[in-house]
Amino acid sequence: MRLLWRSLLTFLICAGAQAQNAPLQPAPARQDPVLAKHVASEFLKEVTASLPGEVKIQIADLDSRQNLAACDELRAFMPPGAKTIGKTHVGLRCSAPKNWQVYLGAQIQVFTEYLVAAHPLTAGQTVTQADISKIRGDISALPSGYMLSEDQATGKTMGTSVQAGTVLRADQLRNAIVIQQGQAVRIQAGGNGFRITTDGQALNNAADGQTARAKLNNGQTVSGIARAGGIIEIAY
C-alpha cells in the first residue's frame, strides 16, 4: 500500500510540473469596438449622402459585454424598417471566421432650411411667397410632412389656420380649386386614336388632379380629372 501511494504521488508531481511547463494558449481575439463603430459610421455616411443640408451622425459604442470574436469580413446594413433620419439603428454582420450579428443605436441629424408661416395664416387662404419664411434647423426633429421648397406650398390653400412660425406641413395644404360647382367646363375625352371635346356644367368643386363631375348638354353625367382652366379630362 505504501508503494502504491508513492507511485500516485510521483505521478501527480510529474503531471503538475508538465502543466506548469506547458505553453499558455492565447485568448481568442475580440472584435475591436473602435473598428466596428467606424464601419457603421462609414456605412451611414453612404446611406445619407443624398439627404439635403448638413448631416451629423452619432453611433452608440459596441457593448463590450457581448465579447464578440474578431471579424475578418465585417459588413454594416440597415435593419428592416429602420429610418435614415432621426433615432434609428444600424446593423453589423460578421461572416468569418465566426458568424454573429449585432445592432448599434444611432442618431442621424440633418440641418437644412425648411418652410414656416411668415405670419398667421387662415384656413382657405391661398399661400403666396410672402406668406412663407425659411429657417434652418434639424429636420429630424420636425413632424412628418415638413416642406423644404417654396414650390411645395405656393398656390395651394390652407386647410387649417396656423400661427406665425409654425412649420408648414403638406397635410395642412390643399391644392387650389380649379373648378367651381356650377361653372361651365370643357370636357376633353380621349383614348387610343380618338379625342372628343364637348361642353358641360360642373357638379362639384375640385382641385387640380381631383375628380370632377359634370353634366353634359344632353343630360348625361360624366366624371374626370380636374385641370386648370375649367377643363375636365377623361381617359378611355
Image (cartoon, rainbow, N blue to C red):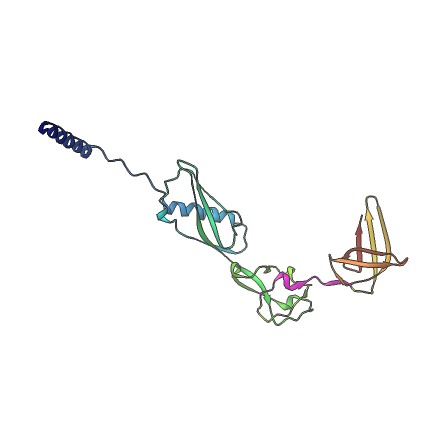
Magenta-highlighted residues? 167-179
Residue most toward the right?
Answer: 218
Q: Position of residue 190 (x, y in %)?
A: 82, 49
Looking at this view, is 127 or 222 the one in front?
A: 222
Looking at this view, is 71 or 115 the one in front?
A: 71
Q: Position of residue 102 (x, y in %)?
A: 43, 45
Residue most toward the left?
Answer: 2
* 124 left or right, relative to 49: right
Q: Position of residue 186 (x, y in %)?
A: 83, 58
- Compared to residue 116, the image places residue 188 above or below, namely above
Q: Position of residue 34 (x, y in %)?
A: 37, 47
Residue at 28% x, 37% y: name it: 26
Count of picture labels: 0
- Compared to residue 16, the image places residue 181 above or below, namely below
Residue at 53% x, 49% y: name it: 81
Residue at 41% x, 36% y: name it: 96
* 66 left or right, relative to 5: right
- Compared to residue 119, the image places residue 222 above or below, namely above
Looking at this view, is 74 or 7 the one in front?
A: 7
* 81 left or right, relative to 161: left
The part of the image, by quadrant, that contains residue 157 is bottom right
Magenta stretch: includes residue 174:
yes
Q: Where does the N terminus fall, quadrant-wise?
A: top left
Magenta stretch: includes residue 110:
no
Residue most toward the front?
Answer: 1
Looking at this view, is 54 or 212 the one in front?
A: 212
